[in-house]
């Protein structure tokens, strides 16, 4: 069990909350605690409460390794959804010192959304509340006994999949506040349609599904996998290629993707890019054995190098844009003037025009 103390101001309710972020080790699949909150005080007043938050999900057989999926198994009453590649944003309830219900939002490892130097989650989520606030708040208010998980994805919050849209929030599931049990998103929004539905999925059918998503990933690079909601629990089904993508050692080592995703999560907790490697290794130790981390350093270093390179691109584009005689102050002005701005910036930056476009858009967050 790992516990990380915090004392932070809730940006959505104006309370100063003190408590502990709780995580269990990856091999403890009985609890799957990964970022739960134990509140101790609110505005310096003792107000103890436990918040069930986002769990980790596994492959069938409760394993973290695609190589250890059981040869034989079966899943009943299965709803299948696309696995979105983004950041988990949890809407959760807590009671203030007067018993008033408060709703705030968090990522996995933080008590509240914030704007770190490299991870402006608070700004991105506020943008989503402007665009889809009616829908998001309806889901939250219509299920007051649940904490609600969304996935924040798009090229403004890129992890590995390069989506064509800038930013979006997808409803994932609800978490019962009383016991942490998960409910299918269709129970929260009947308008949601699963990608596929089956009364029963055998081990053979599961592997066929894995082969299907693998072929889709190889072809378009626009899907990570599927999530299976069933009577036995919630399980992931990921493309074997993306699991080992860019990994020289295959799935017996920490993949490039897992290292990359972990490092992206680490950005939220640092202000100096030179701290990223240490923070990434610290987060990986919550999941992996130190020996496995050591023999996977080539993948970890490659992931950190790519993220660092991406940040340097954004900073270089920003510096060039600041000199642009056509620069504007708002996103709408940029979109209407991009035919002047883009050629000017691209002529001074030797790289992909897509990188220029996305980096400029992020300046208006």
Image (tube, rainbow, N blue to C red):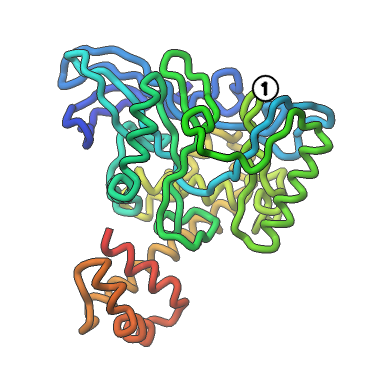
Q: Is residue 144 left or right of residue 234?
A: left
Can you see residue 204? yes
Figure quadrant of the C terminus = bottom left
Instruction: Estimate the x, y position of residue 311 in percent, counting from the top left.
Output: 39, 62
- Is 47 placed above or below 68 here? above
Q: Is residue 228 left or right of residue 280?
A: right
Instruction: Estimate the x, y position of residue 152 in percent, counting from the top left.
Output: 43, 46
The answer to which quarter of the image holds residue 148 is top left
Comparing 149 with 142, the one in front is: 142
Instruction: Estimate the x, y position of residue 87 in percent, counting from the top left.
Output: 45, 44
User: In the image, what residue occupies the spot 69% across and 57% down?
Assistant: 216
Comparing 236 with 309, the one in front is: 236
Q: Is residue 95 left or right of residue 204?
A: left
User: In the image, what residue occupies the spot 54% across and 47% down?
Assistant: 84
User: In the image, what residue occupies the spot 64% across and 38% down?
Assistant: 80
Q: Helix, strand or loop at disc 1?
A: loop
Find disc 1 in the rendering and name its residue.
232
- Is 250 placed above or below 19 here? below
Can you see residue 278? no
């Amino acid at each position: 069990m790992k516990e990380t103390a915090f004392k932070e101001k809730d940006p959505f309710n104006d309370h100063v909350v003190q408590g502990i972020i709780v995580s269990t080790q990856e091999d403890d699949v009985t609890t799957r605690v990964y970022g739960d909150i134990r509140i101790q005080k609110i505005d310096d007043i003792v107000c103890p409460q436990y918040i069930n938050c986002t769990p980790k999900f596994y492959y069938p057989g409760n394993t973290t390794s695609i190589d250890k999926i059981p040869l034989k198994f079966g899943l009943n009453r299965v709803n299948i959804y696309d696995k979105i590649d983004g950041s988990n944003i949890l809407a959760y309830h807590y009671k203030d010192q007067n018993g008033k219900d408060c709703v705030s939002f968090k990522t996995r490892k933080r008590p509240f959304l914030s704007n770190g130097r490299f991870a402006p989650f608070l700004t991105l989520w506020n943008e989503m509340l402007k665009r889809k606030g009616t829908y998001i708040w309806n889901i939250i208010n219509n299920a007051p006994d649940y904490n609600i998980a969304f996935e924040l994805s798009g090229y403004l919050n890129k992890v590995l999949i390069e989506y064509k849209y800038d930013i979006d929030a997808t409803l994932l599931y609800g978490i019962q506040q009383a016991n942490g049990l998960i409910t299918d998103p269709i129970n929260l929004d009947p308008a949601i349609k699963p990608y596929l539905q089956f009364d029963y999925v055998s081990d053979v059918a599961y592997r066929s599904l894995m082969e299907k998503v693998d072929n889709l990933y190889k072809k378009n690079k626009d899907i990570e996998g599927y999530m299976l909601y069933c009577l036995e629990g919630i399980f992931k089904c990921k493309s074997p290629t993306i699991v080992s993508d860019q990994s020289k050692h295959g799935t017996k080592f920490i993949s490039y993707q897992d290292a990359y995703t972990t490092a992206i999560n680490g950005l939220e907790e640092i202000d100096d890019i030179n701290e990223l490697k240490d923070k990434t290794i610290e987060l990986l130790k919550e999941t992996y054995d130190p020996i496995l981390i050591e023999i996977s350093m080539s993948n970890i270093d490659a992931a950190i190098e790519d993220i660092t390179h991406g940040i340097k691109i954004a900073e270089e584009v920003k510096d060039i844009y600041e000199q642009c005689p056509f620069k504007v102050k708002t996103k709408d002005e940029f979109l209407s003037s991009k035919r002047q701005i883009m050629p000017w910036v691209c002529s001074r930056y030797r790289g992909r025009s897509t990188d220029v476009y996305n980096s400029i858009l992020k300046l208006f967050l």
